[in-house]
Amino acid sequence: MAPSCPSAWPSSFTTPGRVRKRPEVRVTTPAADDLVVLGRISGVFGVKGWLKVWSYTDPVEAILDYPVWQIRMPQGWESCEWEGGQRQGKGIIVRLPGCDDRDAARRFVQADVAVPRSVLPRLPADEYYWYQLEGLQVYAVRPQAEPVWLGTVDHLLETGANDVLVVEPAEGSLDERQRLIPWVPGKVVLGVDLARGEMQVDWDPDF
């Protein structure tokens, strides 16, 4: 069922500014029920148990600002304090406790790396982390026209010039089309209301 479209947008909407790919703060206390994924362990490195990590942070080495990671294993999240880490090429390599050889390290390959969102720094009112935008309902608002529900933000893409919102259709939305909407505050993205779970965009619904 489609959500109702308000005739007037409440004052709780803010004009968006910068959107941050990932946070860059130290972790003090793990909270497995409230996590933000910062990267993924992509493979083993060398013969002494080191692991390659594909970091989602910007810069990539900012993931090493977090001394304690939550690692998603088949049986659930495990808290782990890495013993060594450094930049290696385009990625990161780390060594985890108990990983003395390739065989011991392999069990972590393809595991997500996360930290608690509860410790993230508060951003200015017009800045957002990616995870805060995922799941928002996106409305196209045009002059002299009713708001049109396009769908929900599934995820974001980093393209270099601008981040891009990947908006997927939902039951009751305008149509079944996926839309790629650039994050251009004030021009394309007009407002965000996290409390209502909604975003306003200046976007032609036919596009």
Image (cartoon, rainbow, N blue to C red):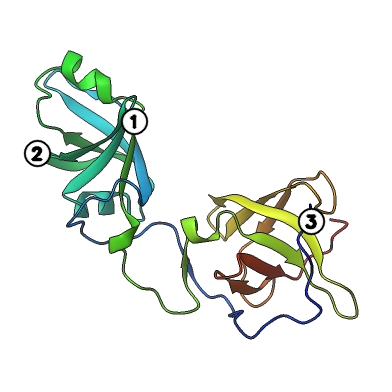
Could you tell me how far apart the alpha carbons at marks 3 and 1 are, in whole angstroms?
36 Å
User: Seen in the image, is 16 located left or right of residue 39?
Assistant: right
Residue lying at the far right in this picture: please name it.
144
Task: Classify 78 as above or below 139.
Answer: above
* Amino acid type of the residue that numbered disc 3 sits on in the rendered structure: Ala
Q: Residues within 10 Å of mark 1 (few under 14, many from 20)?
A: some
Q: Residues within 10 Å of mark 3 (few under 14, many from 20)?
A: few
Residue lying at the far front in this picture: please name it.
1
Could you tell me how far apart the alpha carbons at marks 2 and 3 are, in whole angstroms?
49 Å
Which sits in the foreground, 171 or 183? 171
Image quarter for residue 191?
bottom right
Which residue matches tag 1?
111
Which residue matches tag 2?
83
Q: Residue at x 14, y 17 (%)?
A: 47
Task: Classify 195 as above or below 144.
Answer: above
Q: Residue at x 35, y 42 (%)?
A: 39
Element type where label 3 sits in the image: loop
* Amino acid type of the residue that numbered disc 2 sits on in the rendered structure: Glu
Q: Residue at x 49, y 61 (%)?
A: 132
Could you tell me how far apart the alpha carbons at marks 1 and 2 are, in whole angstroms?
17 Å
Task: Tell me, for residue 19, which label it has, or none.
Answer: none
User: Seen in the image, is 18 located left or right of residue 205?
Assistant: left
User: Seen in the image, is 168 located left or right of residue 115?
Assistant: right
Q: Mark 2 or 3, which is nearer the eye?
A: 3
Q: From this viewpoint, is residue 24 visible?
A: no
Which residue matches tag 3?
2
